[in-house]
Image (tube, rainbow, N blue to C red):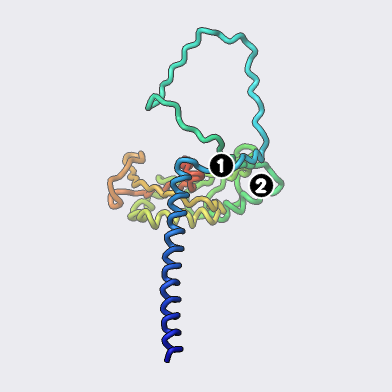
Amino acid sequence: MSSLTQVSILSRKIIRYSIYTAIFIVIVRYSYLIVTKIYRRYFPEPPPPPTVSFGKLPKIPFPQKETPTNLVFTLETVDGKLPKLPNQQAVYFMPKPISTIKSLDTAKQKATGLGFNPNGTELVETVYLFKHNSSPASLNLNIVTGIFSISYNLNSKPSVLENVPPDPARASALAKTYLSRAMSVPGDLTGQTVHQYIKIEDGNFNPANSLSDAHITKINLYRKSYNELPNVTSVL
């Protein structure tokens, strides 16, 4: 009997001290996090040193002239203060498109994917014009940069405007699907999607108030932001 009592007392002590230990660990952990947060607020961790992967910028060759002494500077910003700029900023490598022996073949594949006749007409050295197989549309394509634009002759086939245009969600999906056929949907094209309703009046494109009043749903696809900096280039 005495042995069972001792076991019971010991078990209760183990449970009690285990609870105390768990509570102590939780309090210490949260106290550490709070103290660390307060400390980092007043003493932020320094940023990592710049890698300078692309080398340093060359010095600007300013003309060697005598500096005048009567200069007067006026600060004309919105708030009258200098902006707070970071001491370093990320730099992204932008490869320059170059012409290769396969540039024209790649352009023909892109034209075929978009539904155009691959037998295009050379406008200038790097720009070709492709005609659509079944509609009064033409594709103007730069075979080096891959930049293209599509024109449609509404006067030849105005019946395309008789139907109600797709809603913004469907129009966005259709645009991405169509661009993917030309391998023109980059992986970072995941930013905001902006739409606009357009109606045609007297041969002009004017904003429409609603989908039912529109002939066209215009979609702007934006790239995602990098380092909290928005991308202002739109892909139509």
Q: Which residue is mark 2?
A: 103
- Element class at badge 1: loop
What is the three-letter code of the residue carrying label 1? Pro
Q: Residue at x 46, y 40 (%)?
A: 42
* Residue closer to the observer: 211 or 119: 211
- Element class at badge 2: helix
Using residue 168 as the reference point, say whether residue 122 is left or right of it.
Answer: right
Position of the N terminus by quadrant:
bottom left
Between marks 2 and 1 in the image, the one whose residue lies nearer the viewer:
1
Using residue 147 as the reference point, say whether residue 163 is left or right of it.
Answer: left
Which comes before the other along the chain, label 2 or label 1?
Answer: 1
Residue 69 lies, in percent from the top left, at 54, 8
Q: Residue at x 41, y 49 (%)?
A: 193
Q: How many badges with numbers are in the image?
A: 2
Residue 66 lies, in percent from the top left, at 61, 8
Residue 129 lies, in percent from the top left, at 57, 44
Q: Going by the picture, which residue comes out furthest to the front?
A: 2
